[in-house]
Image (tube, rainbow, N blue to C red):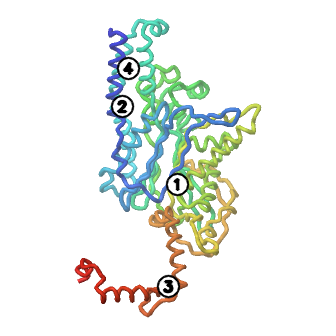
Amino acid sequence: MPTKAEFSSISSDMEALRLNYQEPSHSWTDDLPVCMLSGVGFSTNQKYKPNGFRSEEHPFEDRSFHFRYDENTYFYGVFDGHAGSKASDFSSQRMPAEILLGQLKGKESDEEVREVLHQAFLAVERSFFESIDDLLAEKENLRLQLQGLRTFEAIKQYPDIVQRLNAVTEEIQSGSTAVVALILKNKLYVANVGDSRAVLCTEDKNGKISFSQLSFDHTFSNEDELLRLSHLGLNVQKLTQQSKPGLQNCTRCIGNYTVKGGYKEFDNLSEAEDEPVIAEPNIVGGIKIDDKCKFLLLMSDGLYKCLEEATGTSNTNAMLVNMVLEQFSEQSTLNGVAQAVVDKAVRIHHDAYMRDTETPRCQKHDDITLLVRNFNCCLGNSVSTTSEPNPVLLANDTSKQNVSEHNTLSDIQSLDTSFEKTEYTDDVNPMTENDAISLTSSSDSASRQMLFQFSGNMSLDDEGRIKPYVDFSEFFVAVEEAYKNGLVPEEWLKSSS
C-alpha cells in the first residue's frame, strides 16, 4: 500500500491529467453559428437569508446551446446538471456532434429523424461513461486499499484516501437532464430525459393563444414512469414514499453511473430486473412550423418549480407563457425577453420568502435556464426617434392577454390554455433573422434615422447634393494669389501635377 505522501502525489498527477483532458478551454461547439432567432436567460442557484441576502450553494450546473447549423437546420438544448456539472458539460458538447455531423443526411421521414435523436441520447451517455473510465478504475483501486477496514478505522488511518474516494464517488454520480429541440426543414422535433421542459406556444385562427408541453416529466409523480418501474419488479408505492438516494428525483437522465452501474446496491432498487434509471428519451415530432407558431420555450426545472413553490399552483406553464408574451412587448432583444422572465420568476420566489417570515416556504431555488426560440412574435421595445406610437408594440400589446380557460392534458401531456387577444388591423410581418440582428444595434439605426431627418431639411443643388453651408470663397482667392506669387511649396506643385 502506498504511503500518504506517495498517494497524495499520485492523486494530484491523475487529477491534473484528467482535468487537462476532460475540460478543454475551447470546445468545437464554440465555432458553431449561434441562432439569432433565440435568446437565453439564467439565474444561479440561491439560498435566502433572513436579512434578504442570498448566496450560492454550489457552482452553476445548467448548460445550454442554440445553434443555426444551416438554413434548414436549427438545434437547441438545455441540460440541468446534478452532483456537479461534469455530465451537463459533456452532454451539451457531445449532443450536437451526435446530431449535426452528417447523421441527418438523407433522413426524410419523421420516423427516421426521431431515430437519429433516440440514438444520439444513447450515444451521448455511452461516451460519457467511457470518459469516466479512469475515475471508475480509481474508485475500485481506492476501495481495495480500504478493504477490510471499518469506516471509522479507514477515516482514522487513511483520511486522504477516504477523502479522495468520496470525491471520486461524487463525480461518478454526476448526471444531467436533457431537453433538445431540432428544427429540420421547417419541422420541429423535441426529445427529453428528466424534468427539463419544452413548451410550444401557438395561435389559432380566432386569435386565441394556446400552448402544449412537448416534453415529459420523468419523475416519481409520472404514472407512466411508475408503471415502467413496476414492470421491472419494483414496489412503486414503497419507492414513492421512501427517500431516493442517488436518484436525483428523476427516473431518466444522462449519466449518474452510481445508480446505473450499481443499482443493486440501493435497497429501493435492488429488486429491479433491469436498469431502472435509463437514458431512453421521449420524442415528439415532427410538428409543422407555420405562421400560427409563436415561440418555443426550453427550460430547466428550477424555473417552473420556483413558481410552483411561490404561488402554490401547478399551472406554471400558463404563467410562463403569459410572462413571455408580456416581455415580447417590452424588450428589444430575445436575450432580454428570456432574462426578464427569469428575473421576474426569481423575484416572485424571493418575495414569497420575505412575506412568510414565520414559516418561510421558499428558502432557496435551483439553477435556472430559459431558452426562447421565436417564430412569429415581434419585439416591441425598439428605439424610435419619432413621436408616433410604435406599430410593433401595438400589434403585440399582451397586457390584455389573460388566461381564460384551462383544458385537460392531451396524449402528450399538453396543457392548452387560451388567452384573450386584442385584434389589431396593423399588418406586422413576423421577425426574420436579419431583423433579430438589427434589433441588437437599434441605437445605430436611430443615429442613421436622425441623420436622414436632419439632412432632409437642407436644400439640395441640381445634382441632388447638399449645398455648402460654409463660404470658402475667400480661401480659394487666397490660394490662387499664392500660386501667382510663387508662395506655394515646390513639393506641393509636384504632387498636384
Q: Disc 3 marks which amino acid?
A: Tyr
Q: Nearer the viewer, residue 482 or 351?
A: 482
Residue 401: which quarter of the image? bottom right
Residue 335: which disc?
1
Camera-near label (3 vs 4) is 3
Locate the N terminus by quadrant.
top left
Within 10 angstroms of label 3, few (less than 14), some, or many (20 or more) residues? few
Q: Position of residue 264 (x, y in %)?
A: 45, 21
- Judge whether 137 appears above or below 181 on screen: above
Q: Earlier in the sequence, mark 2 or mark 4?
A: 2
Camera-near label (2 vs 3) is 3
Q: Disc 1 marks which amino acid?
A: Asn
Within 10 angstroms of label 1, few (less than 14), some, or many (20 or more) residues? many
Q: Secondary structure at mark 4?
A: helix
Residue 469: which disc?
3
Q: Disc 4 marks which amino acid?
A: Lys
**Residue furthest to the bottom:** 462
State how far apart marks 3 and 1 are (Cα): 45 Å
Where does label 2 land, which residue?
19
- Judge whether 105 appears above or below 434 on screen: above
Q: Secondary structure at mark 3?
A: loop
At x 59% / y 72%, what residue is drawn? Answer: 385
Q: Position of residue 210 (x, y in %)?
A: 61, 58
Residue 139: which disc?
4
Disc 2 + disc 4, Cβ < 8 Å: no
State how far apart marks 2 and 3 are (Cα): 67 Å
Disc 4 + disc 1, Cβ < 8 Å: no
Q: Earlier in the sequence, mark 3 or mark 1?
A: 1
